[in-house]
Amino acid sequence: MSRPLTLVDLRGMKSRGERMVCLTAYDASLARLVEAAGAELVLVGDSLGMVVQGHDTTLPVTLDEVIYHTRCVARGLRSVAGRAVLIADLPFMSYATPEQALHSAARLMKEGGAQVVKLEGGEPQLETVQALSRQGIPVCAHLGLTPQSVHKLGGYRVQGRDPKAAQAMLEDAVALEAAGADLLILECIPSPLAAEITRALTIPVIGIGAGPACDGQVLVSYDLLGFTARPPRFARNYAQSHGAPDQALKAFVDDVRKGAFPGPEHGFT
Ligand code: KIV
């Protein structure tokens, strides 16, 4: 299929049990490589604050910076008539109220060229997800380890391990879908919980450190390309095994498609 993908196509993939792939990109060159590798989704994540800007957290990233990187990525995708769906992160404190979220999301779409906006959090974000969705703005929700709350969470730790927290996350996921979320990212949670959430939702669920049962997988491209000094345990360095960036990205996409990534060593119980 050479036409641009849509959220409807992604739901179709979920219903057919076809695994989808998301990769981060922050500039036009990486966007072209990720597109060529065959990813269905390209994410301009606020991880750019850590892997591009060198901060310890994603908190300093501004809306203007995400817009700038999204515009670079959109240009890269356009230059190769890309088919991937472009998601951009709403950075920390750019969506503290529904009104602010609408304003920030509109800028990501109008100025950056994003097709979907991503935000972190469950129950407290329901009103915002509803407001965005009502205005026709596609939303990717993000549960589990939500890096913008790193200080509240007490570090980058696995989430949803105790039964109460697991139940709350499942309920949040169901409520986010009902509020209008189109996609859900689950980060760093036990694999059985991710499997349960994936089964409970009709929207595609993309995992990172969430085991093999999600509808798709996402990684920070710099982690799999070996650029990161201390990559997380749930990532695999494909550059080590496959060399050049285009080969490494393609190997990751192929592995996700055939269920060879993530392995048990990349997940949590
Ligand atoms: O910012 C980001 O790159 C992300 C992914 C890790 C899912 O949120």
Image: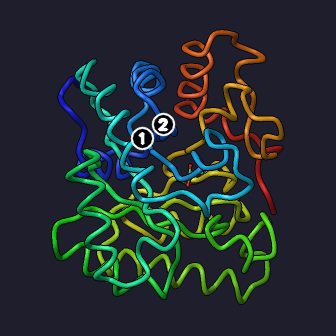
Q: To which quarter of the image does residue 225 belong? A: top right
**Residue 69 x, y percent position in the rendering:** 42, 41
**Residue type indicated by callout 2:** Tyr
Residue visible at 63% across and 43% down in the picture: 53
Which of the numbered marks, if any, corresponds to residue 69? 1
Answer above or below: position of 181 versus 86: below
In contact (CB < 8 Å): disc 1 and disc 2: yes
Give the CA distance from mark 1 to mark 2. Answer: 5 Å
Q: Residues within 10 Å of mark 2 (few under 14, many from 20)?
A: many
Residue visible at 34% across and 87% down in the picture: 127
The local secondary structure at tag 2 comes to loop
- Please state, as top left, top right, bottom left or bottom right, where the C terminus lies in the image: bottom right
Q: Nearer the viewer, residue 69 or 169?
A: 69
Q: To which quarter of the image does residue 70 belong? A: top left
**Residue 3 x, y percent position in the rendering:** 17, 29
- Please state, as top left, top right, bottom left or bottom right, where the N terminus lies in the image: top left
**Residue 141 x, y percent position in the rendering:** 45, 67
Position of 36 with respect to 158 (left or right) is left
Position of 269 with respect to 19 (left or right) is right
Answer above or below: position of 78 versus 91: above
Q: Nearer the viewer, residue 63 or 1?
A: 63
Q: Residues within 10 Å of mark 1 (few under 14, many from 20)?
A: many
Q: Nearer the viewer, residue 131 or 186?
A: 131
| Colour convention | rainbow
Residue visible at 34% across and 43% down in the picture: 86
The local secondary structure at tag 1 comes to helix
Q: Which of marks 1 and 2 is nearer the N terminus?
A: 2
Which of the numbered marks, if any, corresponds to residue 26? 2
